[in-house]
Amino acid sequence: MSSQSPRKVYLVGSRIRELRKGRHLTQTELSDKIGIAQSDLSRMEQGEYKVGLDTLFKVLQVFELKMGEFFGETEDTQAAETRELIKEFHGLSGEAQREVRDFLRFKKLQEQTQRPEPGSPGTQNGPPATQNEEETS
């Protein structure tokens, strides 16, 4: 008798599909990376085939996830997005990384100069008015 319910088989498969699509991989690309036939991956994603532990470990390796992260036990969406941004950043050239750092410094400075002190006018009504807005008020 099966130790996995059909629902659990489907949930594992749908999670693999979600990760695959999130990384813009085709079934063929992912199946090549984990060493299975594309048709088997398709059936796993649809919940028709169980995902073997060896296959699951290969999937985890491709997506650089821990088991708990795969099942959503230790990571929230923001942490996943942060990890993906870091991965993309490391894939950039040195010059592109420098430009990203410069842009981040610019955005931080911009936010600091736009943030009014607590209790000052404009703290309850959004961002400070521009010069043109002040003239028309």
Image (spheres, rainbow, N blue to C red):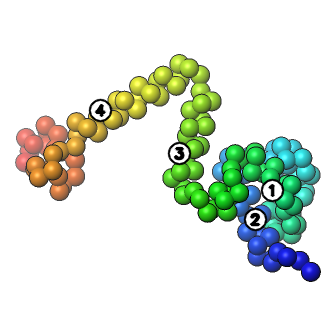
Badge 2 or badge 1: first in the primary sequence:
2
Badge 2 or badge 4: first in the primary sequence:
2
**Disc 3 versus disc 4: distance between alpha carbons?**
21 Å
Q: Secondary structure at mark 4?
A: helix
Q: Find disc 4 in the rendering and name its residue.
A: 109
Q: Secondary structure at mark 3?
A: helix
Residue displayed at 55% across by 40% down: 85
**Disc 2 versus disc 1: distance between alpha carbons?**
9 Å
Q: Toward the viewer: 129 or 77?
A: 77
Q: Do residues under tags 2 and 1 come within 8 Å of each other at their CB atoms?
A: yes
**Disc 2 versus disc 4: distance between alpha carbons?**
44 Å
Labelled disc at residue 12: 2
Labelled disc at residue 90: none
> x%, y% of residue 37?
92, 52
How many other residues sit within 10 Å of disc 2, few (<14), some (14-19) or many (≥20)? many
* Kind of residue sitting beneath label 4: Leu
Q: Find disc 3 in the rendering and name its residue.
A: 82
Labelled disc at residue 56: 1
Residue displayed at 7% across by 41% down: 135
**Disc 4 versus disc 1: distance between alpha carbons?**
44 Å
Q: Toward the viewer: 79 or 85?
A: 79
Residue displayed at 81% across by 78% down: 5
Residue 25 to residue 131: above or below = below
